[in-house]
Every structure is written in structure tokens, then in C-alpha cells.
Image (cartoon, rainbow, N blue to C red):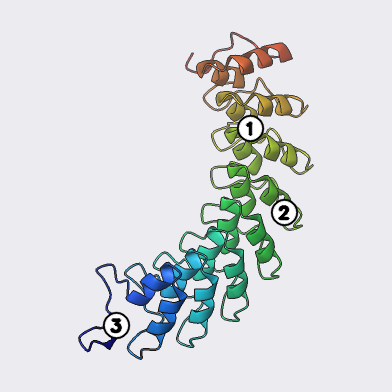
Amino acid sequence: MLLERDEVDPDKPDTDGQTPLYGAAWNGHGGVVKILLERDEVNPDKPDIDGQTPLYGAAWNGHGGVVKILLERDEVNPDKPDIDGQTPLCGAAWNGHERVVEILLARDRVNPEKPDNDGQTPLWGAAWKGHGGVVKILLARGEVNPDKPHNDGRTPLWCAAFNGHEEVVKILLEQGEVNPDKPHSDGQTPLWCAAFNGHEGVVKILLERDEVNPDKPDNDGRTPICCAARNGHEGVVKMLLERSEVAFGKQHKDGRTPLWAAAWNGHAGVVKMLLQWGEVSPDRPHSAG
């Protein structure tokens, strides 16, 4: 009814630059998308003020049917990034929309490893959010580097370990190119992050790898056991204590030991565990003590 009125502009954006087509695509209204695309005045690839096109909106929200409709138009760039450098594939991967990821990857013009302005690839985003299905789909593409880091050095494995995504950690470790002990710019390894956050399952998986140094400190000298002790993760502390390579009385650059960190934060269970293990001085001061 509205489109029958001469005074109605079918491509008029709102103050955010979002056109009626963008709104219909964002919300998955395929019928409305088709009606609007029949109008010559409607630009099917018009971005909003953030550079996000109707295709980006449909992909972000997992509307596979709308994605297919839009991709039928030659004017639509299936790999067009927004102002942050994020493509429709990045958005679909970040949100775990497997069907949309597959639809986009079937297009020759889509780069499966195109990073955004921060260096986050579609694989990086899927790993961060724990979308194992998307990770598998992307890794099936030979062009995708499973160990490609973010601008600050965080790899997909680092992201999965940090957030405790065991399935994704296992998938990535099956890739021969992945370094399971690769630190980011602050020196924090995947094991360090998993220990810091108390992800026992991930810690166990990583400790099974010979390449992983269970006592590797970050740039401030904090080891995985120091972080686990500081945060009261008893299960992680126990796993690390069972490794002969771990120096559980080791001080970081401020002179603080795992025992000091656990005591400071009131983690009685960890304090008891460390004192029972031996080689721990209950009265050892840090450098300011």
C-alpha cells in the first residue's frame, strides 16, 4: 500500500542510515525484502552509517533465506566490510550461524580469512564464541590459517582456551599448524589463560601436549599456578602441582609466590594444598614485605 504512493521513497534511510530494506533484512522478513527489491530505486547494497549493508544485517542474525535472496543481486558485494572491517562472513561466524557461513563460503568473492581492523578473522570470532560447528566449516577451507593471531597476538586457540571452549580447543589442536603454547603480546599462553579462569577441562587438554610448558610465565613473571592460586581454582592448582616442571614456590617479578597470592585473596583451600605439598615457605615475604 505504501509503495503505491508517489511521495513514498522506498529507499529512504533513517538517521542511522538504515533503509527499509535494511530493516526487513535485519529482521528476516523475506517477503518484504522481495517486494522492496522489485523497485529500481532500491539499492540492495546500501550501507548504514556504520557501513553495514542489508546482507550484513541478515548474515549477523542468521537469516539464511534473506541472505540467499540478496546474493541473487549482482550489485550485492558478499564480502563488503563495515567501518570496523567486519564482513558478512565475520558476523555470521561470530554468532554461530552455520548455514549462513556455508552460503557465503560458496561465493567465489568471499575471502574466508579476511580480518577486520583489529585482525579478527571469521575463525577467530567463531573460536572466541565457542562455535565448534563454524570452526570446523572454516577449517575445511585450505586458505584458512588455524593459528593466525589477532593484532595483539591472540590466536584462535588462545581465545578458545580463555573462554573455556573445550570442543573448539580440541578441534584446533588437531591442526598441525597450531602452536599449543603460543603466547600473545603480554606473554600469556593458552594454558595461562585457562588456569587464570579456572577452566579445568581445557587445562587438562593442554597439559597432555608435550609442547606446552606448564610453568611458562607471562611478561610480568606470573606462572599458570600463580594465577590459579590467586583466583582460588583448586582443581587447576592440583593439576599443576602434579607436574614436576612446576616450581610452586616460584616468585614473580614482585616477589609474590602462589602461596602469597592465595593467602592475599583468602583462598584457604589453595593455601592448605600448597602448604601440604612441601617446598613452600609459609613465611616467605615478597619484595615489598
Q: How many badges with numbers are in the image? A: 3
Residue on which disc 3 sits: 1
Q: Is residue 254 above or below residue 21?
A: above
The disc at residue 224 is 1
The disc at residue 133 is none
User: Is any part of residue 194 visible from this angle?
Assistant: yes
Q: Residue 242 or 81: which is nearer the viewer?
A: 81
Sequence-wise first label, 1 or 2:
2
Which of the 4 image quarters holds residue 134? bottom right
Residue lying at the far bottom of the rendered structure: 40
Q: Residue at x 60, y 22 (%)?
A: 258
The disc at residue 171 is 2
Amino acid type at circle 2 is Ile
Image side of residue 196 versus residue 137, left or right: left
- In percent of width and height, residue 94 lies at 53, 59
Image side of residue 70 versus residue 96, left or right: left
